[in-house]
Amino acid sequence: MPDIDQPAAEASDARSDYARTVRNDGRRQRIVKRGGGKRDVRDAYHTLLTLPWWLFALLTILFYVAVNAVFGWLYSLDPNSLVGARPGSYVDGFNFSVETLGTIGYGAISPHDGYANTLVAIEAFLNIAITALATGLIFARVSRPTARIRFASSALIGTYSGQRMLMFRMANERANHVLEAEVSVVLARYMITEDGYNINRLFEVRMVRNRSPLLALTWTALHLIDETSPFHNETAESLAASRAEMIVVFSGVDEAFAQRIYARHSYIASELVFDRRYADVVQPLPDGSWLIDYTDFDTLMPHVRR
């Protein structure tokens, strides 16, 4: 077996990175917008679904504390509104609000007059709405299927089966199968038109096989570089000069959720490596099962000329 080369992250000496549309971790790049339309109230639901879990939990806690703080202040406005509470005590009003909002009802403090009973009725109704919204948001976040598709850190341009090919490797990091797997690829390049406009053009990258009925091990997607290919006669320098970015979108049906999942990745010019090949990561085991060694998933080896 030939000696293994350095990892893909070190395969190129010149790493001229530039802004990309899709980050290496598959998330969308941050986009700053100016002068657009006003945000709709429905955008709040989308924002709450896409927030990181730590930020979603923090906002939920802050909202819960804020609601109790407001009602605690309202209860304290009437010194005689609560039986068992110190007259005008904000702390007792806050604690009673927590009991009311959580339907705990210890019984140490209770409403005394119509003012307090009105606040209790409003807070009880608010509790129903808050519980319904929080339950729906948490369920939507937990039940939404996600993909754990791993992409090789570098895409390769080299000879495969006697033809010039572009290739990149994918694998499912979960211990299940992805059914009806499909991949679509475009090449984005900044170009200057004849009229002097600077535009970002998208070129379709047609794969030799863009669908697979089952993704169980790994999948190396191939693109034939011929006269119709957007990579025809391109070099690492020409791709970098046009700020080229190859955007990959993967989709398939997760057999556990029976729902479609999506993953995305991008390769910029500095991540397109010429005349190398991927190290082997799949091997059969004596018991008939298969082993995928992810420690060499991004490792590149010298191209073997036959």
Image: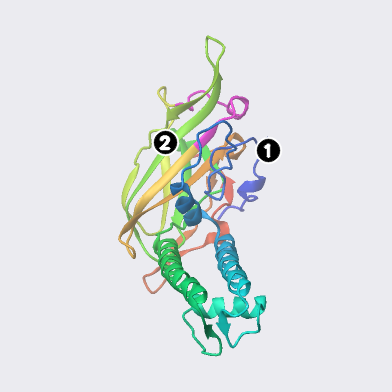
SS at badge 1: loop
Residue located 53% across and 52% down the image = 279
Residue located 64% across and 43% down the image = 11
Q: Quadrant of residue 236?
A: top right
For label 2, the residue is 223
Rendered view: 118 above or below 13: below
Q: Amino acid at mark 1?
A: Arg
Q: Is residue 9 magenta?
A: no
For label 1, the residue is 15
**Residue at the far right in the pictured view:** 13
Q: Position of residue 160 (x, y in %)?
A: 44, 39
The count of marks equals 2
Rendered view: 148 above or below 24: below
Q: Position of residue 35 (x, y in %)?
A: 56, 30
Residue located 46% across and 26% down the image = 230
Residue located 52% across and 85% down the image = 110
SS at badge 2: strand
Q: Amino acid at mark 2?
A: His
Residue density around tag 2, few if under 14, some if 14–19, many if 20 or more, within 10 Å? many
Tell me: 86 left or right of 191: right
Q: Which residues are magenta?
A: 230-246
